[in-house]
Image: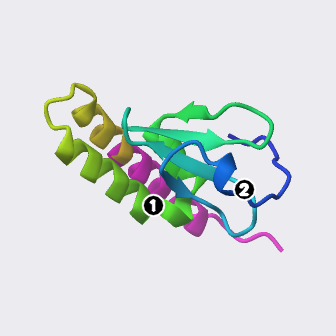
Amino acid sequence: MSQPEQPRQPGPNDLPFATHLINPYGDRHLGFNEDEGRFYRLWEHRRPEPLHAGDAILLRPSGIDQIIKFAVIWATRHAADPRSDALVDRVAAGARAVVLRFTQAAQAPVQR
């Protein structure tokens, strides 16, 4: 997840899924495959990389609300799918990880 990416703004033909979170800074683009109920990291010169839903949140913490929304809508519409519960669990774990990371950062002493 920490691999640097050159800033870019993908065009409509560069987006493999119907649902996307496009970063305004031109990197860390995220797609959601509604057929699979899976998040993907989108790269310019590589195939989309499947992401654990928690990693999607860590990749794009500013999009946590939309990531949760996509996952919950998908899980609701596909309640009988075995991946449904797992997707919601992974989103919850990712949200927890982000909260803990920011909490720890807020408690760390400031070095000047």
Instruction: Please state, as top left, top right, bottom left or bottom right, where the C terminus lies in the image.
Output: bottom right
Which of the pair 55/44 is nearer the observer?
A: 44
Q: Which residues are magenta?
A: 92-112
Q: Residue 111 in magenta?
A: yes
Compared to 104, does 44 lie above or below? above
Nearer the viewer's eye, disc 1 or disc 2? 2
- Colour scheme in the image? rainbow
The image's mark for residue 24 is none
Identify residue type, mark 2.
Pro
- Mark 1 sits on what residue? 64
Compared to 76, does 63 lie above or below? below
**Residue 97 at x, y = what percent?**
46, 49
Identify residue type, mark 1.
Ile
Which of the pair 90/50 is nearer the observer?
A: 50
- Mark 2 sits on what residue? 10
**Residue 16 at x, y = what percent?**
58, 42
Q: Along the horizontal axis of the image, is 71 left or right of 23?
A: left
**Residue 75 at x, y = what percent?**
23, 43
Instruction: Please state, as top left, top right, bottom left or bottom right, where the N terminus lies in the image.
Output: top right
Q: Answer whether labels 1 and 2 touch (C-beta < 8 Å).
A: no
Compared to 66, does 71 lie above or below? above
Residue at figure coordinates x 28%, y 42% from the top left: 88
Element on which disc 1 rests: helix
Q: Residue 23 in magenta?
A: no
- Residue 101 seen: no
Of mark 1 and mark 2, the one earlier in the sequence is 2
Would you say the magenta stretch is mainly helix, strand or loop? helix
- Quick one: which residue is furthest to the front in this view? 13
Q: Along the horizontal axis of the image, is 26 left or right of 102?
A: right
Q: Along the horizontal axis of the image, is 39 left or right of 26?
A: left
Which of the pair 57/32 is nearer the observer?
A: 32
Element on which disc 2 rests: loop
